[in-house]
Image: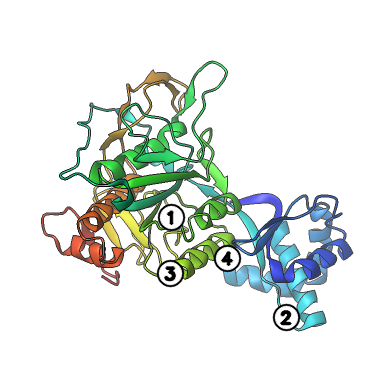
């Protein structure tokens, strides 16, 4: 669940951390850190010699590390040992524990996807239409961080766009994940035909995977953009149960730029496995609305899940090109698919909030979520521990 040999550091602590890593001989400094001024974080790559370092350090702090491992019920990784030593030494030398963490993997589905299934055969969807004419400047803005978008022929260019678009392999075949953003954006558009939906690609259209650094940067890029709702139909557990530093920072940046921004995230599809994780990030974070799928065994059932709604066999938009499924079969879904997952449950909630904002633009997104939950005609249920 962690990108190998990469650390994320608060920019204020970058110099002391760099010097310490050089002193510990685990970073040569030949590759300069990648700095994001919006997040105020830096990514340090190309750490080396971690195996030897971890063995030596573990021997020196055997009692302390063993006690921590027993308490946390897991074995420290090489990066855990490095973080332990860096924090200890800098705290002793400077009186300050630096803010740093691992660059985590962020997944749409693997291994969740195996419990949910590939996109199935769909039926053509009637193109959403506006009830009343809406001027372009009056459209509710919705942000999405996902895979690169596929240009579906039904999507109006003035309504759905992306900073990156899906591409096929050399044989002209797309990965099944190439349609994930299309399915998510299409579901939002079905519910909010007047909204303006912007997708930023923070995940690979080949694998559906990305790192917390990549996704957090795309999340933070929406800060100050005027979006009313941000949809995050992805998530990841972490081996230590800690939230990804970069993702937490991105949410803080977004909320600081617009306290009324509503962030909606998929609760995750690992609820059916023998030992499901306790949290899926970013859905489990404070300030995020976590959406599960009603009646789905795969949907997470933890107290941090706020809302459940339709997430089984959702009809949505997909590629009209050859797609390679998880079993390597190549199919063409002709532009429409039926897909299950909390990704599409979250997208449905995002779209319905956006549509209600369209008719009442002065209201807050949180007020419209509350209104949505009180509407008995809507297929939503509030979980037992939800603040709503």
Q: Is residue 226 above or below residue 154?
A: below
Instruction: Indicate which disc, 1 or 3, sits on the residue closer to the N terminus.
Output: 1
CA gap, disc 4 and disc 1: 15 Å
Q: Position of residue 358 (x, y in %)?
A: 24, 54
- First reached walking from the N terminus: tag 4 or tag 1: 4
Residue at the far left in the pictured view: 377
Mark number displayed over residue 276:
1
* Residue 105 location (% of width, % of height): 57, 50
How far separated are the C-alphas under marks 4 and 2?
27 Å
**Spatial separation of the CA atoms under disc 1 and disc 3:** 20 Å
Q: Is residue 366 above or below residue 347?
A: below
Contact between marks 2 and 3 (CB within 8 A): the answer is: no
Question: Label 4's element?
Answer: loop
Q: Judge whether residue 76 can be spotted in this image.
A: no
Counting other residues with Cα less than 10 Å from the Cα at mark 2, is it few (<14), some (14-19), or many (20 or more)? few
User: What's the distance in space between the residues labelled 2 and 3, CA to CA?
Assistant: 25 Å
Task: Left or right? Give the position of 300 relative to 205.
Answer: left
């Amino acid at each position: 669940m962690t990108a190998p040999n990469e650390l994320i550091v608060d920019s204020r602590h970058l110099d002391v951390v760099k010097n310490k890593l050089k002193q510990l001989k685990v970073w040569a400094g030949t590759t300069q850190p990648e700095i994001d001024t919006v997040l105020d974080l830096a990514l340090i790559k190309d750490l080396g010699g971690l195996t030897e370092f971890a063995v030596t350090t573990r021997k020196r702090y055997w009692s302390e590390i063993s006690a921590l491992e027993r308490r946390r019920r897991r074995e420290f990784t090489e990066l855990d040992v490095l973080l332990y030593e860096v924090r200890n030494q800098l705290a002793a030398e400077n009186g300050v524990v630096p803010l740093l963490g691992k660059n985590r993997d962020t997944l749409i589905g693997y291994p969740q996807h195996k419990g949910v299934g590939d996109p199935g055969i769909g039926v053509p969807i009637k193109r959403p239409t506006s009830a009343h004419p809406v001027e372009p400047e009056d459209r509710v803005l919705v942000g999405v961080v996902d895979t690169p978008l596929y240009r579906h022929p039904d999507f109006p260019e003035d309504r759905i766009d992306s900073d990156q678009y899906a591409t096929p392999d050399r044989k002209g075949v797309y990965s099944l994940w190439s349609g994930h953003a299309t399915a998510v954006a299409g579901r939002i558009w079905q519910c909010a035909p007047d909204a303006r939906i912007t997708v930023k690609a923070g995940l690979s259209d080949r694998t559906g995977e990305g790192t917390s650094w990549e996704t957090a940067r795309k999340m933070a890029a929406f800060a100050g953009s005027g979006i009313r709702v941000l949809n995050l139909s992805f998530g990841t557990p972490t081996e230590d149960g800690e939230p990804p530093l970069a993702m937490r920072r991105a949410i803080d940046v977004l909320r600081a730029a617009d306290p009324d921004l509503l962030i909606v995230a998929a609760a995750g599809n690992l609820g059916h496995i023998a030992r499901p994780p306790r949290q899926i990030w970013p859905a489990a974070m404070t300030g995020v609305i976590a959406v599960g799928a009603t009646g789905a065994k795969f949907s997470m059932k933890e107290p941090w899940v706020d809302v459940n709604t339709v997430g089984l066999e959702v009809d949505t938009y997909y590629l009209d090109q050859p797609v390679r499924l998880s079993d390597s079969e190549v199919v063409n879904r002709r532009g429409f698919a039926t897909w299950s997952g909390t990704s599409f449950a979250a997208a449905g909630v995002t779209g319905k909030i956006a549509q209600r904002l369209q008719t009442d633009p002065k209201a807050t997104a949180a007020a419209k979520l509350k209104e949505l939950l009180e509407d008995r005609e809507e297929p939503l249920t509030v979980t037992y521990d939800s603040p709503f």
